[in-house]
Amino acid sequence: MKRADGRGSGRGPEDAGPKLEMQYAEMAALLEHVPEGIVVLDAEGRPIKWNRAALELHGLSGAEDAGRRLSDLINEYELSYPDGRPMPQAEWPASRVLRGEKLDQYEVHVRCIASDWTRVFSYSGALINGPGGKPLMGVLTLRDITSLRQAQSSIQRDREDLDRAQAVAHTGSWRLDARSGELSFSDESYRMFGIPVGTKLTYESFLGHVHPDDRALVDGKWKAALQGEPYDIEHRIIVGGRVRWVRERAELEFDSGGRIRGGFGTVQDITGRKLARQALQAEKRDLEERVRERTRELEISLGSLELEMSERLKAEEGLRSMTEDLERQVLERTEALAESEKRYRTAFEASVNQLLLIRAVRDANGAVSGWRYMDVNENALRIANLERDNVVGRMAGEAMPEIAAAMATQWADVLATGRHRSHEAAFQGRDYLISVSRMDADTVVSSSVDITDRRRSEEALRKARERNAQQEKLAAIGRLAGGVAHEIRNPLSAMKSAVYYLKLALEKPDPNVADTLALLDREIARSETVISSLLGLAHPGRQARADVDINSCVREALEAGAPADVVVETRLDGTVPKVRADPAQIAVVFGNIIRNAFEAMPGGGRLTVSSHSENGSLSVSFSDNGTGILEEDLQRIFEPLVTTKDGGTGLGLPMAKVLVEGHGGSIAVESEPGKGSTFTVKLPVKKTSGPGE
């Protein structure tokens, strides 16, 4: 039947007698009031019954929510295993029970997608079969163990902190269960006794690690403690074949009848203190022996009583001097330690590195929700232009938020993995090398050093090396050009004259012969151009500088004309100042760049030439929409004899670079294959000149 509260359907009490009806009502009331959640499903996964606790634990409201099938809930809840892995629907508790599996305290992490809450449930359940073994229904019980798991996590962290504190203090702890005779050690106690952590111990096995000469003493003290005497003893133990000293103290627990129930104690490694005490005692005994020997010598001396008393006074004076010297050494050592601590703090504050101590802030679930600055040195405060009170103790998002935004991900990674991280970053126009290390489970240390000057020095060195290599290459080309020019130009002149006379001798030459003579003319002229370019590249010649209007130089370079299918657009700033330059060399530079632009647009296009001035320099840009330059060719475009064009010499752009740099300027290129290139020439502005015409 359909229940009035809408929580399920099934056979109702109207199908049975009054007694069955009463039992049904009692069972329903019992299910509604048990603290555990209970869900009953039919064999097809349809809910038959949800009790109140089950509805509340899943955040469901009643009849409308309770009637949905298991498959309806997959978009509303995310289930995962305890280790965080997503749980497929086939592994959901209800799915496993309906397959016939029996569940016992099956732990599942459940997140409600709509309200974004997460809980940890413990499921138990089984499939109930009807007559003939046919599945009848599945029954699931669940408990909310979220608080239990959080408490266990907190206890584990507390235990880890206690173990860490004991290791720092060289102090362990132990507990004795008198009923089982089992002796439990802390991790530090295991380490102190040289016993593997987790080894089961008893009082007898503990005695086995005590020095044989001290076992009777320890056992006697323990038995006296069982009678109510205090247990506070120093004794030796054997660790790895070596003798160590420990101090043990304990408090025993007795029941009302005076019978021992157990005890809790501490053990402290005092080997260093004991050895120091023994050394002092040995020195004291040695000193006493020497005093005695000296006294005996005085007693048996044949000298007078006055001499004997004099010697004794001298000995006493020596003792006082030795004591005073020892006190002075102790004082000096104390002052030295204080001075060392002061120097250490001074070095921390005066460090050229910027030092930050950052602690993670965790939410109730233990997840990192923010960061807090715990300490910062003066250099970091100076770089950030902040006061200590505005940083220390404050959240990272409030104090120096730009650093927190850039570094929070790396802090979290270092805290989670324990691995050291370093990277370079820019801050306020400077370059820094930032290193992050983990200090403990919640704290990281960030150290940054300014590497701006080093980077600039490296860049200057790289450019100097490039210039040296370029100069060496130009020198080699100059030597080659000087040696080859004479040997080649004479034959070229003879060939040029021969072609000229052949043209005169042949009034109406055959077309093939005419074409051949024209080809010879062009190739001879091209060879002469290459030789002249090589000589000019190696020896640009002395500059004849004058006050030059760059816009006029651009217009003169464009007067040679452009191909018919190329449109030339000029955007020249008429207010740019004049520059001190050699107009002939500037014309060569602009001519080579313009010629390259035309050749990069074999199918036509647009060349845009613009000029402007800023920051003490004048810039002229030549932008085409031609074929562009490949990335691998772009790096070598200004090297001599490197060309990307058929029939090119590879000398035009290197010549332009040499001439521009000879004027104290620079030339740069930006290009994208298929979209075109932009060459920009920068020249220093003549300081005293006015605007050009």
Image: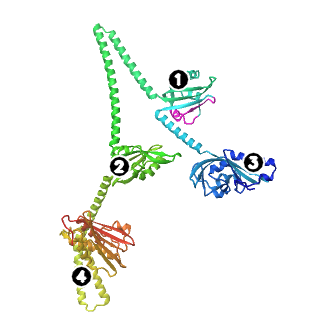
Disc 3: which residue: 25
Label 2, residues with CA under 10 Å away: few <14, some 14-19, many ≥20: some
The first of marks 3 and 4 along the sequence is 3
Instruction: Name the amino acid type tagged 3.
Output: Ala
The first of marks 4 and 2 along the sequence is 2
Residue 554 in the image, given as x and y percentages of width and height: 25, 74
* Number of the front mark, 4 or 1: 1
Let me know if residue 195 is in the magenta part.
yes
Q: State how many labels appear.
A: 4
Label 4, residues with CA under 10 Å away: few <14, some 14-19, many ≥20: some
Q: Is residue 2 above or below residue 535?
A: above
Q: Is residue 608 above or below residue 184?
A: below
Instruction: Name the amino acid type tagged 1.
Output: Asp
Disc 1: which residue: 214
- From the viewer's side, name the closer residue of 534 and 227: 227
Instruction: Name the amino acid type tagged 4.
Output: Lys
Image point (59%, 48%), residue name = 119
Disc 4: which residue: 496
The first of marks 3 and 1 along the sequence is 3
